[in-house]
Amino acid sequence: MTTKIIAHRGASKLAPENTMPAFNLAYQQGAEAIETDVQLTKDNVPVLIHDEHVKRTTNGIGYIKDLTFAQLKQLDAGAWFSQKYTGTAIISLEKFLEWIKPKPLYLNIELKNNKIDYKNIETIVYDMVRHYQLLNRTTLSTFNPKSVKRISELHSEIKIAFLTSRRNKNLVPYARELGANAIHVKYRLLNRFLVDQCHQANMAIRAYTLNKPSRMLKSYALNCDGIFTDVPDLALQYRTVFKEQNK
């Protein structure tokens, strides 16, 4: 099995996270999948940004839920990272799906609803992914167990991953009971037993966020289904090294 390289918020070590420059760079570097985060605006537009508040990654202030998409589009989401990216905008999920549709990329959409449980975010995002005919290459993920359950009950056609950073000896049966068919874990939780347990249960297991070669190599050796990384070019380079060493 080949571990899939998933660009975490795009190539976010080299370009501002969750923006078109980061996604384009990840694609150019050869990433096989892209992970991005979705929040809902005041007027229920799904937008790509990690934090519930705009302060860290834009020149604005306020919560996403209190701002309209028109207001968010006026913010600069690139200058905080580098002058080179001044003027980069927050984008909608719709614009991103239009961009990714013709490309041979898998998609992981993380619903950021563990702190603010946005009403109907699951259905809004699902309907948009279905509209762009991307259900067969999309996973929805969330830290919110209630959200996993809602997705599995309402939209069983799409793959669902339960995200966690907490140790739980019953993680696999717990995630299955919620309705997930994949588990995304913080790297420190990754071990041979968990990987084997997931695969025996016919569940994918992916780890986040791996930027060090030693961690990448360990994940490849464990047959992890995918790794989330801010440096997809480096991950691809070390996956080639791993394959050469294990011919």
Image (cartoon, grey):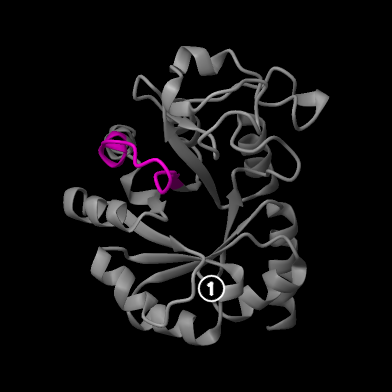
120 in the magenta segment: yes
Q: Is residue 90 visible?
A: yes
**Residue at horizontal 61%, vertical 32%?**
19
Which image quarter: residue 146? Answer: bottom left
Instruction: Write down the quadrant of residue 207 in the picture.
Output: bottom right
Q: x and y percent of residue 124 in the render? A: 29, 34
Q: Which residues are magenta?
A: 109-124
Report the residue marked by disc 1: 224
Which x, y percent locates residue 51? 55, 38
The residue at the point 76 percent across, 68 percent down is 213
Residue 59 is situated, as x and y percent measured from the top left of the image, at: 67, 21
Helix, strand or loop for disc 1: loop
Q: Is residue 33 above or below residue 133?
A: below
Q: Residue furthest left?
A: 153
Where, quadrant-wise, is the C terminus in this rendering?
bottom right
Whether residue 157 is visible: no
Residue drawn at point x = 68 percent, y = 53 percent: 232
Front residue of this view, candidates 110 and 223: 110
The outermost residue toward the right is 83
Tell me the kind of residue under disc 1. Cys
